[in-house]
């Protein structure tokens, strides 16, 4: 059974924004420690320009090749089977490790609201619930995503309206607002990325979008405008309320408001903030199931991961990565390591996708491109900034962070190298052979016809 075309631009907008919206509610604020308020603001500006140029470039790729594999499909067409595989692994690194980070924050928000709730149990319970929820079908999940996204945006609006009158410029411009100079700006980039991480995930629903050539650009462009606007206000209001100083937490918006209003309105924002976390958790889980499905369908992974149920949901592609995510969420100590793993995978995948765009322009000039980016200016800006961001993520985050897993502290660089070593070994001994078999079978079927 194949995926079903049921999504409209509003659904794609909701999926794209929903996958990201939790990034407004937590994670990004750890950039204050790296560059101060001004340093994080500059980093956020760089990242915003990158994502804006990247999403226009990505819209060209996703409308030219509207497949569930997203980046793996683009890279395979441009760089060959191995390039497509590496892009797919980088994408899975992003989409498998982002949900545990979001789930951990969901547990932290629940614990903030109800101190008696064990945050670890809440984390694991939320993750399992949304993995199972995704079994009901893409249209139903998209409606849930739309509802949660709208509620989360309402929560942000409440935060802005309540916080703006109390913003103090002394909280933004002071002796600690720009620390570590240019190095601080680069070190803050990985956390600024969290404002937009996974916005491209809507492309993985491309095969399920009605009239993708027209509707995908509408959904993508609407999403980047929405998130850029929200990012500006979230950073300004949180910093203006003093959220850039003191002990940082996994619930920065309620923490900032509580300094002005106490726990009253802060609790309301925390409750609504849960909808943002729900939207991202739900949307990214859908994203990794489609990426796994596409890699299995194309022959990279075992075929059972591409089997769908009556609702068109790839069950194996949902449950196997979901189980990995649950283990990470329940056993990892949230010291930003999961965020950094996810951000690294995302930026690596973005750069591969941009290189694929340049190659496809040369290699297939006659490829149908219903949406054309301003080439080569826009994708060139995106690629240069993407490489800068990837450098910053590796130097200032990957090489300086450890992941606590089952009580063992593992350097993050070893974790990443281990994942790619295992992935490449799997490809050499299994994946490449499967691809050859698929090609041979396709050739025989074509000859018979």
Image (cartoon, rainbow, N blue to C red):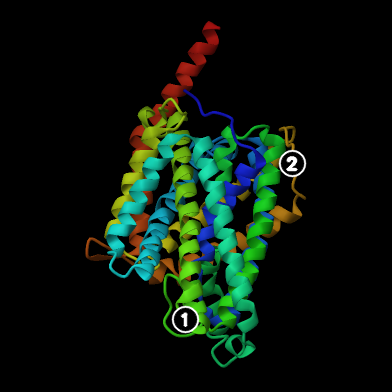
Where 378 falls versus 439 (above or below)? Answer: below
Q: Secondary structure at mark 1?
A: loop
Where 60 falls versus 334 (above or below)? Answer: above
Judged from this view, the residue extending furthest toward the top is 448
Please provide percent x and percent y for residue 270.
46, 67
Where 2 falls versus 86 (above or below)? Answer: above
Residue 371, disc: 2
Judged from this view, the residue extending furthest toward the left is 407
Q: Nearer the viewer, mark 1 or mark 2?
A: 1
Please provide percent x and percent y for residue 322.
36, 45
Please tell me which residue lies in front, 120 or 419: 120
Q: Which residue is mark 1?
A: 262
Which residue is depicted at the point 42% across and 59% down? 102
Q: Is residue 392 left or right of residue 131?
A: right
Please provide percent x and percent y for residue 104.
36, 61
Please tell me which residue lies in front, 176 or 409: 176
Please provide percent x and percent y for residue 23.
52, 62
Q: Is residue 238 left or right of residue 126?
A: right
User: Cβ–Cβ below 8 Å for labels 1 and 2?
Assistant: no
Residue 126, disc: none
Please tell me which residue lies in front, 379 or 219: 219
Residue 359 visible: no
Of marks 1 and 2, which one's residue comes earlier in the chain? Answer: 1
Query: What separation in Å lies between label 1 and label 2 (alpha carbons)?
Result: 49 Å
Q: Quadrant of residue 43?
A: bottom right
């Amino acid at each position: 059974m194949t995926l079903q075309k049921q999504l409209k631009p509003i659904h794609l907008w909701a999926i794209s924004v929903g996958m990201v919206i939790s990034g407004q509610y937590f994670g990004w604020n750890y950039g204050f420690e790296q560059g101060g308020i001004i340093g994080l603001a500059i980093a956020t500006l760089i990242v915003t320009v990158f994502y804006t140029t990247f999403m226009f470039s990505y819209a060209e790729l996703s409308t030219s090749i509207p497949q569930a594999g997203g980046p793996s499909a683009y890279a395979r067409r441009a760089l060959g089977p191995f390039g497509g595989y590496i892009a797919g692994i980088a994408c899975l690194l992003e989409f498998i490790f982002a949900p545990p980070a979001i789930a951990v924050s969901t547990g932290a928000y629940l614990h903030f609201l109800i101190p008696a709730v064990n945050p670890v149990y809440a984390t694991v319970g939320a993750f399992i619930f949304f993995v199972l929820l995704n079994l009901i079908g893409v249209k139903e999940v998209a409606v849930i995503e739309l509802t949660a996204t709208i509620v989360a945006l309402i929560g942000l609006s409440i935060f802005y309206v309540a916080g703006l009158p109390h913003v103090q410029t002394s909280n933004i411009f002071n002796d600690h607002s720009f620390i570590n100079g240019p190095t601080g700006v680069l070190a803050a980039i990985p956390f600024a990325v969290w404002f937009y991480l996974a916005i491209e995930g809507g492309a993985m629903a491309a095969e399920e979008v009605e009239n993708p050539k027209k509707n995908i650009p509408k959904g993508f462009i609407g999403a980047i405008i929405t998130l850029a606007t929200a990012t500006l206000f979230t950073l300004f209001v949180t910093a203006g309320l003093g959220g850039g100083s003191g002990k940082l937490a996994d619930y920065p918006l309620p923490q900032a408001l509580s300094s002005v209003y106490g726990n009253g309105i802060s609790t309301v924002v925390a409750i609504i903030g849960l909808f943002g976390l729900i939207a991202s958790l739900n949307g990214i889980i859908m994203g990794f199931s489609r990426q796994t499905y596409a890699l299995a369908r194309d022959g990279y992974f075992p075929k059972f991961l591409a089997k769908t149920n009556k609702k068109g949901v790839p069950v194996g592609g949902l449950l196997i990565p979901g189980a990995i995510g649950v283990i990470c969420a329940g056993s990892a100590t949230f010291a930003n390591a999961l965020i950094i793993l996810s951000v690294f995978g995302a930026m690596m995948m973005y750069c591969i996708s941009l290189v694929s765009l340049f190659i496809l322009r040369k290699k297939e000039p006659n490829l149908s491109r219903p949406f054309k980016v301003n080439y080569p200016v826009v994708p060139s800006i995106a690629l240069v900034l993407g490489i800068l961001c990837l450098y910053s993520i590796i130097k200032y985050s990957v090489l300086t962070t450890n992941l606590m897993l089952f009580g063992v502290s593992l350097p993050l660089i070893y974790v990443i190298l281990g994942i790619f070593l295992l992935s490449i070994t799997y490809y050499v001994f299994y994946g490449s052979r499967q691809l050859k078999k698929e090609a041979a079978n396709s050739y025989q079927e074509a000859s018979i016809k």
